[in-house]
């Protein structure tokens, strides 16, 4: 197991290196003038040149790449051209918001997806099954950002049931004391029920917009594997033994059907991290997604590279965890 | 007995399934229709759609922002009947509507301020903070190009327009409690030059700033400049004690000033959460005092999505939502609690033509391009009637505007003739524009279809702003055509002309026509040093005519400023000589 993990980390490092080089080359191929962007269009040419020198943009590309690699090892991801803040600091500041949204969304997807999948399999062929198939197809087909706007228009604009966005009300409530940066966790840890309720309230729409696709995928996959397991001999044996239907289902069948779902969770996490970009923009969620979007719009290369690096690492680690999780869920799987 | 009933029962046949699916589909459709249903509560759009008391107290201030301004010089830009003007209102200064208890204004911005340091900040979002917290020696009378005293009580201009002397107001305190005096002014100006960022360009003509005594400041220019006062309005005075105290490694307090304000202005920064929101609160020691109706707090949440901003305005969660498209504003027209303001704007939108390379180096080809564009079409379809047909590089009512100039009109026959005379055929040209700006994209499209009719192919290249800068700044790479929305952030017509058509700006922002005309430049330079406004304007009008004759750009629009604002906002006037969307925070307040 240890060897397996170490090998995976080595692969991850190689991946990061390749990515940095690729991004670096790409960013220098695109004609743009970061120095000009930093000083603004009204500044004199002299000011632009001074800024260019300050940013090290007048050095040869290879040297710049070397400097960047060296700094990255020292965990210095550079300074954002747009707002002048250290990139790593900004990323760490915004990451918890995205994680919280992704995790809550994942919970929603898994809980609802599993429930829908299990009951669709149990009630195969009924109206319930057909309806959930429709929901699944719609969920996969609907673009998350479109759904996000629709949810916002209906549930905020028209019905005023939910807020328009951000993580907490604009006024009248303070952030919970920052421990992890995830408001639900922090407010629980500090006993701040008001903040907990308010954060949860603000999470509903964005998490659902992000999670609908996951509900769809998970429910379909669960249903399929459930149906296979339901036809196996051990199921017949369990029923023959006299076990109630629910015990059969939940103690035996579901546990065998879960593996592929875990795979989906891993892949889904990647989509969540990517999908947050637009959802965060629509709901004004101060996370990595919004940070990346701004960076791209401003051709803010240090920020773009930092954010991309971060997402890559996060995605790789989550998938590694998922693979390790397999080992626990299914004793048949062991890693050499 | 344990139940042996299997849970998979009751297969549904196809007919039942289809019926259920149809029901689901129909109900979803009904739900979405309810959500997107336009018009809302069908209230007839009236001027006092908000139901508030009439605020028609005639204002003594010259506020020239009335929508259907057919008086005086702007008559030359005949407007087609507008779809919005009739129900748009213009709050006049001096409103008497009773103030609400809650004087916290919510202003939604698309992005956080890039910088809040007055020696660095030069764009809309950043200036929302800077203009609230810092003041200059003088200020514009909002809505006009006239100047009024601010931190200075009086001023004298030398006869050669090269020396400006200001008498400072006594007893003005900075946010940190120190007193504003001549030394503070001198140091603030010097700091802008030393930092050498965007705002330093505004002080290009300044040679030195002298503190003659405690309450007298003299600004000596390198060359005579009759319009220098406009720049004085842009330089905010900072407390030297504040930045000197927080200087880090010689940065002149730049780092500290990105998180704090130290000006004399009515509001101070209390919170800046990047990419989330900015908050400013009243500065109790403000020299003009707080009698009368005023805001207590300014909240600026960052809301990048236009749909969200529009909804927040409708639901009352925001009072200002700048940067909405014309269609968005039209959709908000008549909704309860919203005023659509249409204000005079000195912006001229142009498509630049690179005169340094064939085929656009031939003035006949350039004139052909001008004749090809559908000006009326753009005004009607894109601006929805809110604008004037342009007559040249200067907009109506802007200093040195020549009302006798005829508006540009499309004439495809003339265009074809000119091309034939110039001996060009089968032209193919590249034109770029900023990919996120709808107005630019539409003008480019209109030009493309117009040019097709005279046998010219236009290849459209949408680009991000930063890339456009790079390409257009390089003489080799610069495309034949580019698209610029030239707003006037000063009342200096010499700068407005030089910026696009001046010799010192060739190839730099924004002379992307790579154009210069010695005779016109001489006139502009002469006008810069002529204190007598009428004489100066005459010289500039001659220069304008030369520029128009050379056709370095297609002057395709003079749009009005269209903004949807909460009807609770009182005394808000659009400022046409500052960066977009600036608000006179001290003068506005919220009604009940």
Image: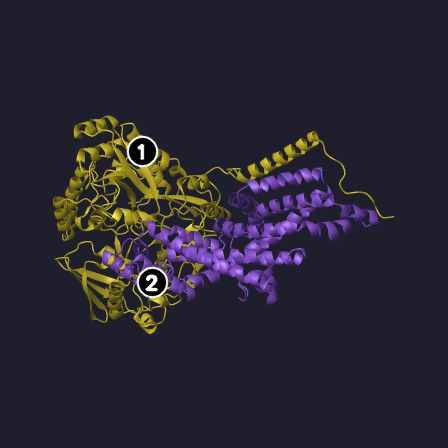
User: Which chain does tag 1 point to?
Assistant: B
- 2 vs 1, front mark: 1
Q: Which chain is yellow?
A: B
- How many neighbours does mark 1 have within 10 angstroms: few (below 14), some (14-19), or many (20 or more)? many
Q: Quadrant of residue B427?
A: top left
Distance between the alpha carbons at the discs numbered 2 and 1: 42 Å
Q: Is B413 on the left-hand or right-hand side of B173?
A: left
Q: Reply above or below: B427 against A45.
A: above
The residue where tag 1 is placed is: B448
Q: Which mark is residue A111?
A: none
Q: Nearer the viewer, residue B361 or A155?
A: B361
Residue at 49 percent of width and 60 percent of height: A10
x%, y% of residue A43? 26, 56
Figure colour of chain A: purple
Asked which colour scheme the image uses, the reply is: by chain
Q: Are marks 2 and 1 on the same chain?
A: yes
x%, y% of residue B289? 37, 64
Q: Is any atom of residue A96 visible in this view?
A: no
Q: Residue furthest right?
A: B1
x%, y% of residue A319? 56, 55
Q: Nearer the viewer, residue B515 or A308?
A: A308
Q: Reply above or below: B303 against B195.
A: above
Q: Judging from the image, what secondary structure is the residue with disc 2 in?
A: loop
Q: Do the residues bearing badges 2 and 1 touch, measured as CB atoms within 8 Å?
A: no
Q: Nearer the viewer, residue B172 or A40?
A: A40
- How many neighbours does mark 2 have within 10 angstroms: few (below 14), some (14-19), or many (20 or more)? many
């Amino acid at each position: 197991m240890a060897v397996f993990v170490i090998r995976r980390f080595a692969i991850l490092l190689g991946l990061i290196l390749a990515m940095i080089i690729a991004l670096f080359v790409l960013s220098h191929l695109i004609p743009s003038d970061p120095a000009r962007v930093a000083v603004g269009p009204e500044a004199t040419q002299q000011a632009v040149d001074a800024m260019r020198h300050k940013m090290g943009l007048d050095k040869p590309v290879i040297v710049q790449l070397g400097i960047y690699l060296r700094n990255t090892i020292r965990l210095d991801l550079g300074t954002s051209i747009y707002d002048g803040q250290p990139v790593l600091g900004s990323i760490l500041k915004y990451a918890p918001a995205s994680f919280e949204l992704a995790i809550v969304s994942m919970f929603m997807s898994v809980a609802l997806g599993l429930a829908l999948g299990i009951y669709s399999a149990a009630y195969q062929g009924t109206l319930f099954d057909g309806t959930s198939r429709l929901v699944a197809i719609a969920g996969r087909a609907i673009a998350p950002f479109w759904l996000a706007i629709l949810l916002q228009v209906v549930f905020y604009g028209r019905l005023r049931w939910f807020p328009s966005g951000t993580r907490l009300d604009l006024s009248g409530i303070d952030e919970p004391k920052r421990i992890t940066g995830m408001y639900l966790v922090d407010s629980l840890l500090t006993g701040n029920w008001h903040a907990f309720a308010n954060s949860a309230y603000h999470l509903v729409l964005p998490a659902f917009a992000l999670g609908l696709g996951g509900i769809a995928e998970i429910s379909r996959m669960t249903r399929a594997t459930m149906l296979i397991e339901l036809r196996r001999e051990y199921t017949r044996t369990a029923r023959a033994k006299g076990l109630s239907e629910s015990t059969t289902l939940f103690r035996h069948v579901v546990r065998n059907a879960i593996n592929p779902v875990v795979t989906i969770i891993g892949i889904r996490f990647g989509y969540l991290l990517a999908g947050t970009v637009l959802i965060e923009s629509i709901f004004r969620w101060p996370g990595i997604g919004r940070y990346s979007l701004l960076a791209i719009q401003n051709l803010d290369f240090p920020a773009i590279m930092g954010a991309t690096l971060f997402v890559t690492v996060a995605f790789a680690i989550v998938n590694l965890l998922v693979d390790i999780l397999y080992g626990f869920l299914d004793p048949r799987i062991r890693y050499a | 007995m344990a139940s042996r009933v299997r849970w998979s029962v009751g297969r549904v046949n196809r007919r039942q399934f289809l019926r259920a699916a149809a029901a689901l589909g129909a109900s979803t459709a009904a739900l979405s229709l309810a959500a997107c249903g336009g018009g809302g509560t069908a209230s007839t759009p009236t001027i006092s759609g908000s139901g508030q008391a009439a605020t028609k107290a005639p204002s003594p201030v010259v506020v020239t922002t009335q929508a259907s301004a057919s008086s005086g010089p702007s008559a030359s830009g005949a407007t087609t009947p507008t779809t919005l003007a009739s129900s748009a209102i213009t709050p006049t200064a001096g409103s008497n509507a009773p103030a609400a208890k809650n004087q916290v204004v919510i202003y939604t911005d698309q992005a956080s301020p890039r910088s809040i340091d007055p020696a660095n900040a030069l764009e809309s979002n950043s200036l929302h903070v800077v203009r609230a917290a810092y003041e200059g020696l003088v200020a514009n009378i909002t809505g006009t190009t006239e100047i009024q005293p601010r931190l200075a009580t009086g001023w004298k201009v030398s006869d050669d327009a090269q020396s400006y002397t200001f008498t400072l107001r006594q007893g003005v305190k900075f946010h940190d409690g120190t007193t504003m005096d001549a030394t503070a002014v001198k140091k603030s100006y010097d700091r802008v030059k030393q930092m050498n960022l965007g705002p330093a360009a505004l002080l290009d003509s300044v040679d030195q700033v002298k503190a003659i005594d405690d309450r007298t400041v003299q600004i000596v220019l390198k060359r005579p400049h009759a319009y220098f006062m406009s720049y004085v309005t842009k330089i905010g005075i900072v407390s030297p004690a504040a930045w000197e105290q927080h200087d880090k490694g010689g940065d002149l307090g730049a780092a500290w000033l990105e998180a704090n304000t130290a000006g004399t202005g009515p509001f101070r920064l209390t919170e800046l959460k990047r990419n989330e929101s900015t908050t400013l609160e009243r500065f109790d020691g403000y020299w003009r005092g707080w009698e009368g109706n005023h805001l207590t707090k300014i909240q600026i949440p960052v809301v990048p999505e236009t749909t969200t901003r529009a909804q927040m305005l409708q639901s009352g969660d925001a009072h200002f939502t700048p940067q909405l498209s014309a269609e968005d504003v039209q959709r908000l027209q008549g909704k309860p609690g919203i005023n659509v303001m249409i204000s005079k704007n000195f912006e001229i939108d142009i498509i630049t033509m690179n005169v340094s390379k064939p085929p656009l180096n031939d003035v006949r080809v350039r004139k052909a391009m001008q004749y090809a564009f559908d000006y009326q079409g753009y005004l009607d379809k894109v601006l929805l009637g809110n604008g004037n047909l342009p007559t040249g590089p200067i907009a109506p009512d802007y200093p040195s505007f020549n009302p006798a100039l005829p508006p540009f009109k499309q004439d495809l026959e003339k265009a074809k003739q000119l091309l034939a005379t110039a001996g060009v055929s089968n032209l193919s040209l590249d034109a770029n524009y900023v990919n996120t700006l709808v107005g630019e994209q539409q003008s480019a499209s209109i030009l493309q279809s117009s040019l097709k009719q005279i046998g010219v192919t236009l290849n459209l290249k949408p680009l991000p702003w930063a890339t456009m800068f790079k390409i257009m700044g390089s003489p080799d790479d610069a495309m034949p055509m580019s698209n610029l929305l030239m707003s006037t952030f000063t009342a200096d017509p010499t700068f407005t002309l030089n910026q696009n058509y001046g010799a010192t700006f060739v190839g730099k922002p924004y002379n992307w026509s790579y154009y210069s005309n010695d005779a016109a430049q001489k006139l502009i330079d002469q006008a810069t040093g002529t204190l007598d406004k009428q004489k100066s304007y005459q010289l500039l009008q001659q220069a304008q005519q030369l520029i128009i004759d050379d056709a370095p750009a297609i002057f395709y629009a003079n749009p009005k400023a269209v903004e949807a604002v909460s009807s609770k906002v009182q005394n808000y006037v659009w400022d046409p000589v500052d960066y977009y969307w600036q608000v006179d925070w001290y003068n506005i307040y919220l009604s009940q």
